[in-house]
Image (cartoon, rainbow, N blue to C red):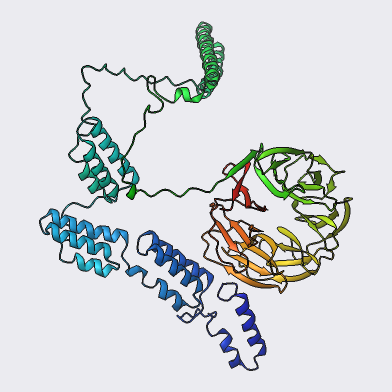
């Protein structure tokens, strides 16, 4: 099971068989398709997660080099994710090496073109063979098409044309139109040929009969004034040059003083006076030049950089647009990127965030960073509302809730060993800070079964503390239960039966559920084979409490917290997901959103684990959902690490 050959349900089924066995032969069916310590292999053995990952990598490589089409790749990836034995995997990837790649097709086309250039093939046969090469799917088919052609005849075919090559060819055609070499109808025809070309040779043939502007500049008409010479603006002086001169002067001064002292001790007084005088004059001159250089550098820094970017007499931007006539039937509009909004910045990196809908319906976001503050933003117009200032160290965790009396509050924690409670109506602190001990790591707000609003602070080394948010009374402290050493993260939740638990995980162990009152382990969720990075919880429309976890094993797992079982496992992810949050859409669909550091996202339906077609551009380890009546917002890290970005689910 640790190797990924068995899921949890299959493991438990076989465990029942093993426990019920009376003689040795009864044990054989439970492990017949599993490898043993002797290194036994075979197509009938169950595949491990590592081998499945290697097969997926081979599949991605085949897609990249053209041996597999996109639609076939999707089907093959699904088959690999469902594969059970090595024979199932071999049926998917066993014949990939026999497929024809882009490079092999290019080699075949090069041999055909070389044969045409050498007179071995006529144009009609060339056309037929090139069409057959593009249809070929295996190496054997390509080899049969060029078997009667010499391998080294003619010049090698040029590489495939890139976007930059096509743009350069279009610019060449523009120059020809401006010089009067091409008329507009022929220009349109050649532009279409450029964008249809796949090879550099084809591009070269389109512009072969046109003058090269680099070697054949167009003459200036007599009735036009000659262009003024381009004079590059002088480079401004820099601090670096001034500081280098100062260092050289200082080193030279000490050296000359040493020489003068040696000459004086040797009795060469006159020579010592001459050397000392010359050294003093040179030293003063270098100091004056250093001062002028650094003064000029300061003045240059006050000038906008745009003034020095372009040569003197040259326009920074062209005065008129350049147009390319393209047939609308050949134009494919680019897909519009998802709409995003960026909130204001902190003076340091963003470390924590949360969101809350106030009693009047206003959605707000609270962000905390390395500037020792938390800031409140109005998500209806992205404006700043309050700054929560009071910590003496970074704000590393934030939670928020609305108290039973209707007062919205936020709780922030910091390495200054305090948690502070804030009134979100005006940003003022409520009572004295709470003492959370050394190294607080996480904070959550929740309502117990009896309606008591509590804040739960997780301390990496000391355990979990709980306070009543109404009077800030300490309700209790529990240790980490059966974990040995540190616990990396805790995620409190109240089950439908009213039991308050915390889902905890360290960097090696499974997910364990602790009773928040006693600290005893209630149950354990087994399945992940690497460290769990993030967990969130939700309640499905049918009342089932679920947890969603992401792990270094590149899977997303959905757990049933009522039955303590695994509901769904989502595999096939290219990167480790770093954060996951649960929320719902305006129509009530429960979803989970996960992302990694490569700005890839996964939006899944919590009921069946299916992927939903929502476009987001998220990255990092911070995600916060905001569910509104007409839309769902996801907050995450922007490309600027000091600001948060708001993504509508579209």
Closer to the camera in the image, 15 or 222: 222
Q: Position of residue 315 (x, y in %)?
A: 39, 24
Where does residue 511 sit, x and y in percent of width and height? 69, 66
Considering only vertical position in the picture, is 610 above or below 455? below
Q: Position of residue 513 (x, y in %)?
A: 75, 67
**Above or below, 386 relative to 97:** above
To which quarter of the image does residue 147 belong? Answer: bottom left
Looking at the image, residue 602 sits to the left or right of residue 87; the answer is right
| Relative depth, front residue between 38 and 144 | 144
Q: Residue furthest left?
A: 119
Residue at the image point whose x is 43% and y is 48% from the top: 334
Tally of numbered discs: 0
Q: Is residue 420 above or below residue 284?
A: below
If the image is split into quadrants, where does the N terminus sit?
bottom right
Instruction: Residue at the far top: name it.
Output: 270
Snapshot quadrant of residue 389: top right
Image coordinates of residue 11 in percent, x first then y, are: 62, 79
- The one nearer the camera, 639 or 247, is 639
Is 157 positioned to the left or the right of 74 in the image? Answer: left
Answer yes or no: is residue 635 visible: yes
* Residue in the image at 66% along x and 71% along y: 526
Q: Is residue 51 visible?
A: no
């Amino acid at each position: 099971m640790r190797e990924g050959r068995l899921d949890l349900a299959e493991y438990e089924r076989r465990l029942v068989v093993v426990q019920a066995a009376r003689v040795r032969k009864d044990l054989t069916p439970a492990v017949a398709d599993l490898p043993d310590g002797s290194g036994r292999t075979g197509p009938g053995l169950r595949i491990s997660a590592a081998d499945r990952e290697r097969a997926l990598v081979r599949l991605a490589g085949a897609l990249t080099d053209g041996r597999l089409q996109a639609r076939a790749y999707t089907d093959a990836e699904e088959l690999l994710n469902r594969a059970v034995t090595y024979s199932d995997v071999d049926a998917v990837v066993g014949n990939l090496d026999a497929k024809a790649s882009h490079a092999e097709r290019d080699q075949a086309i090069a041999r055909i073109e070389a044969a045409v250039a050498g007179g071995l093939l006529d144009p009609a046969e060339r056309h037929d063979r090139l069409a057959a090469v593009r249809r070929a799917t295996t190496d054997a088919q390509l080899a049969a098409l060029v078997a009667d052609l010499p391998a080294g005849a003619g010049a090698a075919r040029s590489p495939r044309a890139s976007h930059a090559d096509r743009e350069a060819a279009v610019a060449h055609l523009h120059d020809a139109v401006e010089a009067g070499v091409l008329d507009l109808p022929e220009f349109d025809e050649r532009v279409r040929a450029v964008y249809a070309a796949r090879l550099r040779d084809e591009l070269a043939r389109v512009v072969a009969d046109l003058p090269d502007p680099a070697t054949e500049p167009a003459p200036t008409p007599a009735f036009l004034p000659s262009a003024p010479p381009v004079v590059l603006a002088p480079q401004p002086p820099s601090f670096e040059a001034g500081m280098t001169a100062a260092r050289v002067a200082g080193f030279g001064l000490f050296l000359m003083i040493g020489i003068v002292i040696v000459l004086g001790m040797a009795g060469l007084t006159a020579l010592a006076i001459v050397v000392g005088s010359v050294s003093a004059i040179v030293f003063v001159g270098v100091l004056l030049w250093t001062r002028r250089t650094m003064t000029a550098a300061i003045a240059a820094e006050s000038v906008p950089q745009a003034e020095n970017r372009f040569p003197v007499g040259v326009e920074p931007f062209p005065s008129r647009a350049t147009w390319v006539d393209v047939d609308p039937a050949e134009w494919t509009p680019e897909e519009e990127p998802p709409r995003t909004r960026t909130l204001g910045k902190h003076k340091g990196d963003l470390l924590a965030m949360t969101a809350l809908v106030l009693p009047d319906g206003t959605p707000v976001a609270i962000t905390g960073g390395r500037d020792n503050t938390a800031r409140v933003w109005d998500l209806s117009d992205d404006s700043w509302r309050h700054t929560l200032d009071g910590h003496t160290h970074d704000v590393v965790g934030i939670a928020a809730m609305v108290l039973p009396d209707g007062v919205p509050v936020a709780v922030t924690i910091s390495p200054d060993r305090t948690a502070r409670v804030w009134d979100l109506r005006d940003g003022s602190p409520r009572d004295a800070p709470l003492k959370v001990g050394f190294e607080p790591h996480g904070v959550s707000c929740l309502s117990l079964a009896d309606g008591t609003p509590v804040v739960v602070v997780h301390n990496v080394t000391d355990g979990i503390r709980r306070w009543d948010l109404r009077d800030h009374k300490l309700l209790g402290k529990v240790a980490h239960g059966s974990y040995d050493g540190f616990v990396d993260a805790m995620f409190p939740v109240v089950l439908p039966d009213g039991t308050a638990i915390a889902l905890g995980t360290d960097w090696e162990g499974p997910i364990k559920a602790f009773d928040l009152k006693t600290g005893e382990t209630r149950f354990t969720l087994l399945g992940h084979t690497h460290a769990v990075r993030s967990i969130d919880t939700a309640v499905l429309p049918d009342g089932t409490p679920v947890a969603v976890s992401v792990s270094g094993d590149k899977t997303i797992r959905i757990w049933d917290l009522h039955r303590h079982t695994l509901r769904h496992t989502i595999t096939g992810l290219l990167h480790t997901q770093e954060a996951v949050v649960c929320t719902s859409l305006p129509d009530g669909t429960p979803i989970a959103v996960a992302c990694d550091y490569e700005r890839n996202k996964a939006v899944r339906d919590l009921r069946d684990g299916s992927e939903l077609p929502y476009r987001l551009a998220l990255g990092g380890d911070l995600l916060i959902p905001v569910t509104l009546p007409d839309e769902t917002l996801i907050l995450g890290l922007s490309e600027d690490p000091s600001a948060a970005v708001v993504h509508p689910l579209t």
